Amino acid sequence: MQKQTNSYGQLLPDQVDRISSLFDAHLGLLADARELYRERAALERDYATKLKQLAKKASEKKNKNELLLVLGDDKAVYTESVIQQNTLNHAYSEILSSMSSSAQDHINLAEAWSQITESLKAVERRNDDYKKKQVQFFSTILAGRDKIYAERIKSKQKYDADCAEVEIHRQKQSGHDRHAERSARQYDLQRLDMLNSKNIYIISTATANSVKTKFYTEDLPNLEDSFQELQTRLVMDFVGVMREAQNIQLSHQNISKDRLTAVIAALIGVQPDKDQALFAERNIHPFSLPNDWAFEPCSNHYDTGDICIDSGPKVLLQNKLARSRAKLRELNHVLGKKRTDAEKYHDMLTACATDNTPGDMDDAMNSYLDAAHEVTALSTSACVLNSEINMIAEVLGGDEGGSSPHVFKSSAFSIPTTCGYCKVSIWGLSKQGKTCKSCGLSVHSKCELNVPAECSNVHGDYKASEILQSPSSAVSISESRSSVSTSSRKTPIPSSSVPHNTSLHVEETHRLARAIFDFAASSSFELNVTEGTVVRVVEEDDGSGWVKVADSDGEKGLVPATYLEDVDGWPLEKSEPSQRDSQQASGIYVRALYDYRAQEPGELTINEGDLVELSSGTNGGQNYADGWWEGFSRDGKKGIFPSNYVNSA
């Protein structure tokens, strides 16, 4: 198939709908002509007088639709001279004129006209299929573009939401409750999520801009040129059938030879390039690419449009860069093969057009269109990957991370497993996490890109990521290990291994310890003690270096284990549930839906079916925190628990 001189893709950017309407008009012309010859065959069997009526009817229909045929718009401003410049319209007018002049009965031609009708029907059906395929492909690439646009908007919304969450956690961090360490930890995690969201948003913005440019400079022009080639083939097929019809009539109507010769001359004079140039000339209008998108800072969080390359976000960028490059290498191989296929099928189309073999032409056309569509889709993917690679590589400036990436595969975890990155448990049978095939490191799927490319390639030899260890955080290692984000606790995971506690009252014993140094609490989780103060050890050191104690006023908190020494010879003190705690009960009960085992000091272990009485006060009960309530177990112990593990009793 020869390249069009007047390319729609160059002259008429972003006018697929109008070009499609033009194609429909040509198909409509085929339908009109087919109907014309079908009715003519019937009329020739009856009376020649009806032939003139039919020609008149067809002429009126042509006059009604000729603006669509010539200019693609039935409401365009035109002059008759413009319409006459269209070679196809002129040729069809000559056909109608010849039919009006040849009003003699030619009943013997009825069967010949029936064959012409079938040929037109075949051309119409074939080209209608081509048109549907093109329209469907246009919808596909449009949907692909809009999906990337939507991903940009979604990443923007995610970034805004994370910014809002950062501000909420920052405000919580300034409070003075005993869970401020948790708030500090959650603030660091949320800030990291916000920075990652920001980077993804910036990348998605650049990607959307790249895809947009490709869409308007490559995809649409290629689609329009493909439409133009199909239109040329449609016109030429139509002209071929019409020439055949006229030749049949000429061979049987020597009387009408002169008129038919004129019609043939008009059909021979059909020049799709000329008609397309006229159509393009009348539809050209100023066009420019839509403006690029830019980073939009959150309204309630100050930020800039620069990609964050702090240690945590940089790891994600490095991993994303490596992954994008690997994907691009694979994609380029496939894309090159598909482009070769498209060129081969295009050459086949050209050869078929020269040999005039319709059957081979159909196969070659379908193969060419399929290959061209695949090339467009793959080149869009390559555009996305190149955009990501160029932006990330420029920002990293050569610091592309480790050279030994982990080889993660999806895994199911039948028992709780600690994530090597965020230290939160992974548990589920539906591939909720991933495990490195080389070293055995297990992480959440969402944490995969946050793990540095420092695989030891020795199974069992790996070190946990310390990216989340913030210098400003006072949270210990053990509490970091047990701290769980709100999002990871949204789906309760009942544990049938937790024994059901049937005791109504528990008497607790605690050893005594003496402070050997002064310690000033830096958060509400910690407790102020002075040298020589005797305290009760509520929870022993679990390896984190911190001990939870209670002073003589009943206040509880964490102090460093190295700041305490045993009180030799002091008797063990027995303590019962505080009467003050019972006085803080609200009288409102909830029932546990699942077992929950306390994961850190201050949390409450509950079993399925247990009744828990909520505490009172502005910071107690359901007012404790988002996703967490405070209450008393049946043995009088006070603590917090996930709100989605219970319902009203």
Image (tube, grey):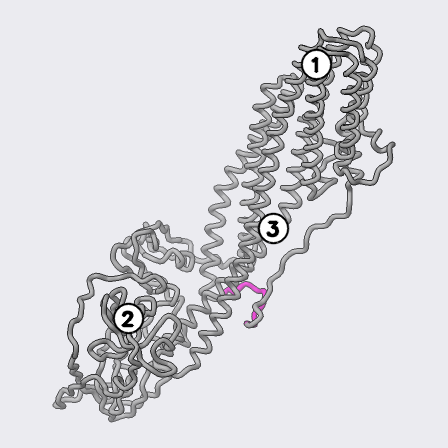
- The residue stretch that appears in magenta: 301-309
Main secondary structure along the magenta-highlighted residues:
loop
Mark 1 touching mark 2, by CB under 8 A?
no
First of labels 3, 1 by sequence position: 1
Q: Residues within 10 Å of mark 1 (few under 14, many from 20)?
A: many
Spatial separation of the CA atoms under disc 1 and disc 2 = 85 Å
First of labels 2, 3 by sequence position: 3
Residue holding disc 3: 210
Residue holding disc 1: 41
User: Mark 3 against mark 1, which lies toward the viewer?
Assistant: 1
Task: Mark yes or no: residue 116 visible.
Answer: yes
Q: Is residue 220 above or below residue 315?
A: above
Task: Mark yes or no: residue 523 visible.
Answer: no
Rendered location of residue 471, percent (x, y):
41, 75
Spatial separation of the CA atoms under disc 2 and disc 3 = 56 Å
Q: Residues within 10 Å of mark 3 (few under 14, many from 20)?
A: some
Q: Of residues 597 and 450, which is closer to you in this image?
A: 597
Amino acid type, callout 2: Ala
Image quadrant occupied by the N terminus: top right
Q: Of residues 629 and 304, which is closer to you in this image?
A: 629
Rendered location of residue 158, percent (x, y):
50, 62
Question: Along the horizontal axis of the image, is 343 left or right of 7?
Answer: left
Q: Is residue 276 above or below residue 643?
A: above
First of labels 1, 2 by sequence position: 1
Residue holding disc 2: 649
Dividing the picture into quarters, in which one does residue 19 lie? top right
Q: Of residues 496 and 559, which is closer to you in this image?
A: 496
Spatial separation of the CA atoms under disc 3 and disc 1 = 57 Å
Image quadrant occupied by the C terminus: bottom left
Q: Is residue 228 above or below residue 472?
A: above
